[in-house]
Image: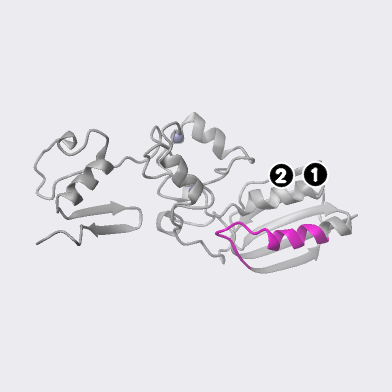
Amino acid sequence: MIAEEIRVTGIVQGVGFRPHVYHIAKKNGLRGEVFNDGEGVLIRILGSEESVVQFVHQLQKECPPLARINKITRTNYAGEFNFDDFTIASSIHSAINTQIAPDAATCPQCQSEIFDPYSRWFRYPFTNCTHCGPRLSIIRAIPYDRSNTSMAKFTMCPTCDREYNDVTNRRFHAQPTACHICGPKAWLERADGKPFAVTMFSMLDEIDAVCTLLQQGEIVAIKSIGGINLACDSHYPI
Ligand SMILES: [Zn+2]
Ligand SMILES: [Zn+2]
């Protein structure tokens, strides 16, 4: 049996890296822990030499889509080792020298949930998961935990909270996870501030009303997470 401390640097926070580590550690029968700190991710493992080698190999080979590993440093671990299992531990606040992923476009799985009438994310514009959604534009401090992002004020509903804490779920520790019940809402305003009813443009919701406005040749400023996009139908006659 060998005990090692494995330091992983690069874009490894907020990209599903800890659950990735957890799954392959369990698969290889290793004990230990993984956590985020100011340098990136730190892993402590105990197991046979063969399974540790296999673990490190899979760590790089099966990297989550948004993660980018710069360096993996393995050292012998001489500290106390009181682990019966493999766990994801709380982040440690230390000197900061790590990278954060940029915002990523909605992944295919989230897209299918948004368009599925039976999904609880049906037409929810801020749907995201560990593999997509905002990162850099919502972060206020490192480590990248929900409490350090602009999502901190949106308290998760019991269902989102359950998924956030379920290591087998795609939204495990997805810091910006949100839904119709607990997350930010979209609304529509006129540029001149005059009141109007969304139902004048759509019987569905604000997003659909924007589609109607664009089809009518209007220009819409869409204020989202990372800034404002001006949208119009470029084929519309002036
Ligand atoms: Zn996603
Ligand atoms: Zn929710």
Q: Is residue 62 magenta?
A: yes
Residue drawn at the location 55% of the way across and 39% of the way down:
164
Task: Give residue 83's mark.
Answer: 1
Residue drawn at the location 81% of the way across and 55% of the way down:
79
Q: Seen in the image, is 233 located left or right of residue 161?
A: left
Residue drawn at the location 64% of the way across and 51% of the way down:
18
Residue that label 2 marks: 87
Q: Seen in the image, is 215 located left or right of residue 60?
A: left
Q: Quadrant of residue 60?
A: bottom right
* Along the line of sight, the residue nearer the viewer: 76 or 226: 226
| View extreme (right): residue | 1
Relative to 67, say whether 114 is above or below. Answer: above
| Picture quadrant of ligand 2 | top left
Give the residues drawn in magenta, as a range.
Answer: 53-69
Q: Is mark 1 within 8 Å of ligand 1?
A: no
Q: Seen in the image, is 63 located left or right of residue 77?
A: left
Relative to 182, say whether 60 is above or below. Answer: below
What residue type is disc 2 on?
Thr
What residue type is disc 1 on?
Phe
Relative to 147, say whether 165 is above or below. Answer: above
Can you give x and y, in whole percent of width and height, for residue 104 in the image? 46, 57
Q: Is residue 224 magenta?
A: no
The N terminus sits in image quarter: bottom right
Q: Are marks 2 and 1 in contact (CB under 8 Å)?
A: yes
Residue count near mark 2 (Cα–Cα under 10 Å), binned few <14, some 14–19, many ≥20 = some
The C terminus sits in image quarter: bottom left
* Along the line of sight, the residue nearer the viewer: 178 or 38: 178
